Structures are given as C-alpha cells and as structure tokens.
C-alpha cells in the first residue's frame, strides 16, 4: 500500500519539488563557498586554451599553470584594488553627493513649476530611485571586490581545475575506450562553451573600455569604476546595459544638472551597447547562444537570489553553457529549444 502511494504521479511530483527546494536553499546557504568556486569554473574554462597553448610551445604542465595562475592573480588583485579604492572614495563623498543631488532636483522642480507644471514631488521619487540603483551597483561592486580579494582561493580553485583538465582526455579514453565518441563530443562542447566565454569576455572588456574613455571625455567622475561595472554587467544581455548606465547617468546629473552632459552620457551608453551588443556581437557570435529574454530574467532572479550579486553576473554564462551542452546532446535538445529565443 505504501509503495503504491509513493508511486502515484502527484506524490512523485511533490517529492521532486521538495527536493529541488531543499537543494536551492542549500545552495543559498553555501553561497559564500559556491560563488568563488563557480567563478573559478568560468575562469578555468576561459583560460584553459591558454594553458594548452603554452604546453604546445614546450612548457611543462606545472610551468604553464604557474604562468597562468600568476597572470590571474595579477588581474584579480588589480581588479580588487581598483574596486576597493573607487568604492572608498565614493563612500567618502556620499554625503556631498546626496546634498548636490537634492539641490539639482530642487532646481528641476522649480523650473517645472515656473512652466506651469503641478508640484508632484518628482524630485523625492527620483532621488529614491537613484539611491536604490546606487545601492544595487555599490553592492554588486563590493561583492565582486570581496571575491576578487580572495585571490588565493579563486586561483587555487582554477589551478586544480586546469590541472584536472590536462588529464581528463586520458581518463575518458581509459574509461570509455579510444574509439568511443565521448571524448570527441565533450571536446566539442568544451570548445563551444569556451568560444562563447572568450567572445563574451572580449566584448565586455571592449564595452568597459569604451564606457571608461567616453565618460572620462565627458567629465563624469569615477569613470573607471563605471567602466568596470559596465564590463561586469555586459555578461547579462538586455537588462545588464540598463543597470550599468543608471549610476553613471545619476553621477552626470549630480555633477552638471539636467543638460548636455547628461544627454551625452545617455547617448554614449546607447551608442556603445547598440554597436557592441546589436551589431558586433551577432556578427562574431551568430545565433549559437541566443537566450530567451524571459530565460535571462528568470536566471538573473534565481541566481541573484542564490548567490547574491555574483550570481547575477554568472547567471547568463551558466545558462548559456547549459544551452550549449543541451544543443550538442540530441536527447536534451528540447531543453536548448526552450532556453533559446526562437
């Protein structure tokens, strides 16, 4: 009788649902451990081709790993110092910036009132929205800076993942046989994921550089910090560019008031993300990793809830990797179709 009850579809569905919920809460509880490890997985896939290239040039495996690990440490330390310094300076100026923003909003409301517009307290609402967006951006940068500060831990994870990748082909050959297609299939999947991450990272770096230079030319403060934020959020299509632009536009408004510089800042972000996201990215990447906007939104919410701001950044690369794997494996192609935007 008990076995019959357990085998009913409703009970099985309930058990699976409870299991999924338990796993999600376990992941959230272990976010401090999992976030650096997932970041290390993404970095390891990204730089694995560099290790292979160095080994192909005659360097021993350990030497290649040390070289790549050293480069990663330098990049992560530099990123941590850049973010920490920028946030420290920004935090020190917050009282002045809030006063300046209140003054600018009062000027805008007075100008609207002189033109006959009713007093709708738009300034207070805009300030609340700006404070909220600034808090999100600051939280994101603090979280990334915190993980980047754990350089040794992340590099340690990456080195062991890369070391395992050097012996994985021989393990697969031993396990499945030399004639098995498993190794070839996994190699193709890894190459596709790697190609996506390399292209996405290169384009994100281009976006970050363009944002930094453009904001510096306009005269917006903390241009380098906003460039780093644009680099990170460019991994999130559709929504990332909007989130990245808000703090810089608010800063331009605080500095210069409603006028040319604010308009130039908005137009700069629109132009950069149109050129890179809508024109350059499809030409370089094609439609191989096109994700549904709804899937992107759900992934952002889910991974952001599970792992915090780092989950927000990693959400789309992780889902894109799942889509690539599902697309390469015929029985799971239905999942790739559901995740795609067509």
Image: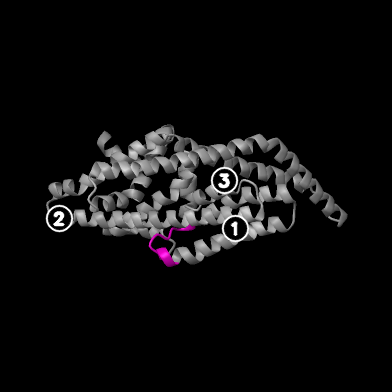
Q: Which residue is mark 3?
A: 225
Q: CA distance from mark 2 to mark 3?
A: 49 Å
**Left of 291 or right of it: where is 99?**
right
- Mark whose residue sits in front, 2 or 1: 1
Q: Which residues are magenta?
A: 283-294
Rendered location of residue 195, percent (x, y)? 35, 57
> Pointer 2 and pointer 3: residues touching (CB < 8 Å)?
no
Residue 292 located within the stretch drawn in magenta: yes
> Pointer 3 and pointer 1: residues touching (CB < 8 Å)?
no
Q: Quadrant of residue 34?
A: top left
Furthest-front residue in view?
58
Q: What is the secondary structure assignment of the residue under circle 1?
A: helix
**Left of 149 or right of it: where is 4?**
left
The circle drawn on residue 269 is 1
Q: Residue at x 62, y 37 (%)?
A: 89
Q: Nearer the viewer, residue 27 or 100?
A: 100
Vertical position of residue 147 compared to residue 296: above or below: above
Q: Nearer the viewer, residue 174 or 69?
A: 69
Rendered location of residue 225, percent (x, y)? 57, 45
**First in residue order: circle 2 vs circle 3:** 2
- Mark whose residue sits in front, 3 or 1: 3
Q: Can residue 23 be spotted in the picture?
A: no
Q: Can residue 292 be spotted in the picture?
A: yes
Q: Which residue is mark 2?
A: 180
Vertical position of residue 180 compared to residue 283: above or below: above
Residue 25 located within the stretch drawn in magenta: no
Q: Residue at x 25, y 55 (%)?
A: 187
Q: What is the secondary structure assignment of the residue under circle 3?
A: helix
């Amino acid at each position: 009788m008990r076995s019959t009850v357990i085998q009913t579809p409703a009970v099985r569905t309930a058990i699976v649902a409870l299991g999924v919920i338990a796993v999600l809460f376990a992941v959230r509880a272990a976010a401090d451990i999992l976030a650096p490890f997932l970041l290390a997985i993404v970095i390891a896939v990204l730089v694995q081709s560099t290790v292979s290239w160095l080994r192909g040039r005659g360097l021993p495996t350990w030497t290649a790993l040390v070289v790549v690990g050293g480069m990663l440490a330098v990049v992560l330390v530099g990123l941590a110092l850049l973010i920490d310094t920028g946030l420290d300076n920004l935090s020190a100026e917050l009282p002045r910036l809030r006063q300046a923003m209140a003054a600018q909003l009062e000027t805008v409301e007075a100008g609207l009132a002189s033109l006959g517009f009713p007093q709708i307290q738009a300034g207070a609402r805009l300030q609340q929205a700006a404070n909220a967006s600034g808090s999100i951006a600051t939280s994101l940068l603090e979280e990334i800076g915190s993980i980047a500060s754990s350089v040794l831990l992340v590099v340690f994870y990456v080195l062991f993942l890369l070391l395992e990748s050097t012996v994985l082909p021989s393990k697969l050959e031993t396990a499945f046989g030399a004639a098995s297609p498993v190794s070839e299939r996994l190699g193709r999947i890894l190459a596709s994921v790697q190609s996506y991450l390399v292209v996405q990272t290169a384009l994100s770096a281009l976006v970050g550089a363009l944002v930094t230079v453009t904001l510096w030319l306009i005269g917006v403060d903390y241009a380098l910090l906003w460039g780093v934020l644009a680099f990170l959020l460019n991994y999130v299509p559709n929504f990332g560019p909007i989130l990245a632009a808000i703090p810089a536009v608010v800063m331009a408004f605080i500095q210069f008031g409603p006028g040319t510089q604010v308009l130039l800042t908005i137009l700069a972000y629109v132009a950069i993300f149109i050129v890179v996201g809508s024109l350059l990215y499809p030409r370089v990447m094609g439609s191989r990793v096109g994700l549904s906007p709804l899937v992107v939104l759900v992934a952002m919410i889910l991974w952001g809830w599970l792992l915090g701001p780092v989950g927000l950044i990693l959400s789309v690369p992780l889902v894109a990797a799942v889509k690539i794997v599902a697309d390469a494996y015929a029985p799971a192609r239905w999942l790739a179709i559901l995740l795609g935007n067509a």
